[in-house]
Image (cartoon, rainbow, N blue to C red):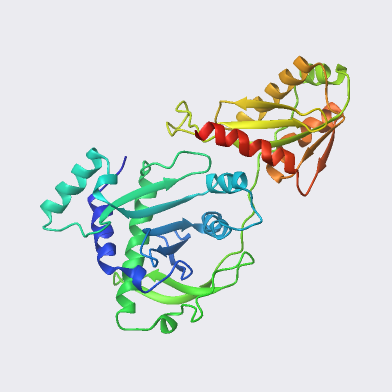
Amino acid sequence: MILTDDMLAVAFQYRDTELWNILTDSDVFAFRLSDGETGYCCVMGNGGEHLALGFYRGQKGFASYLKSLGFGSMRFSEVDMLEMAATFDCINCDFIQASAVQNKTKKIIRDYVNAHGLKVRRPKGWPDFTRHLPFKVPLGITCEKDAADIVEALRAAIAVAGELACRSLTELGFDEKGDYPTMEGGKPVPYLVPNAEGTYDWGMIELPALLPDEWPAPEFTNDILIRRVKKLRTSGTLQMKLIHMPAPVDESADGIPFLPSVLLCLDAGEDGLFPVFCMEDGEEAPRQMLVELVDNLCRLDNKPDMIEVEDGRTESLLKDFCDRCGIRLSRKEELSELEDACSFLIANFMQ
């Protein structure tokens, strides 16, 4: 874990601003990172509960913010909400109670505070840096680039707080109505550009539209397995959904625990349900999932005439497989029985 003096210095300076008393989580602002990319920031804590600064790198990162606006929507099931949260790609600097800080981290922070004559504010004054990566367990910062990014983000937020001490929200370019950004993008927000004097030039920039997720679409080129599937008797329809289990696996290439995937398969006509697990991470995981699916179909001695799916991720996983194996693939608006089965499986894993 990386926790530098620079990170702690700007975290405590930001905590002192109490910027969440002025800005809400709809008051997004942007700044130019040192590598030229645009960073986006969201100030959390206006309701007094979750004190934090959220940082999103570029349009891809900002998609995490936009997706979070859908939380609580009736459009999404509980399973879909968990899946959406698992795709987040951002860095948070949260402020938490001392009791929630790990002892090793607490010692680092306490040593810094004592060395610089600072005090930890109450309540929720202990900085907690969290890196969210898609389908990984949120952990502390382990990458130097991420550490540099959140330092730049906090400095920009401190500059916003300084300007708000003498200028109004509307003068700085914040939306007077406080409307949330839209999925279509285009909302103008303040844009801070570092200058040679060590301060910022202020301008405006339009927020990007939601960047759709890109899902793996593996080619299924194993001729031996294709022939095995084609020889199976054909009957019925299977409904399938690819989800991730809330039970992390530690064996990953980058050392960060990941959420294993499972392809839930439901024969609605026969009330048959079987999960296909993949306990691997990385680029080969989708192909391994398809190999496991073939093994399951062969044990059943049956391939479906049709596979029904309701989301783009599962459709992308299965498209080439179905094309090569002579199985029809159909996209549906809703598969309620399959959703119930997913919820049941997740609930049992979380007990």
| Residue nearest the viewer, comparing 315 with 34 | 315
Relative horizontal placement of residue 42, taking residue 325 as reference (left or right)? left
Relative horizontal placement of residue 197, taking residue 190 as reference (left or right)? left
Q: Is residue 195 visible?
A: no
Q: Is residue 296 visible?
A: yes
Spot occupied by residue 167 in the image (x, y as percentages of width and height): 35, 84
Compared with 255, 116 (above or below) is below
Spot occupied by residue 291 in the image (x, y as percentages of width and height): 69, 22
Q: Quadrant of the N terminus?
A: top left
Residue 299, picture quadrant: top right
Relative horizontal placement of residue 104, taking residue 20 as reference (left or right)? left
Residue 71, picture quadrant: bottom right
Could you tell me which residue is drawn at 42 percent across and 60 percent down?
Answer: 33
Relative horizontal placement of residue 173, taking residue 219 as reference (left or right)? left
Residue 120, picture quadrant: bottom left
| Residue nearest the viewer, comparing 50 with 33 | 50
- How many numbered callouts? 0
Spot occupied by residue 336 in the image (x, y as percentages of width and height): 73, 43
| Residue nearest the viewer, comparing 301 with 65 | 301
Could you tell me which residue is drawn at 52 percent across and 43 percent down?
Answer: 134
Compared with 74, 244 (above or below) is above
Spot occupied by residue 153 in the image (x, y as percentages of width and height): 37, 60
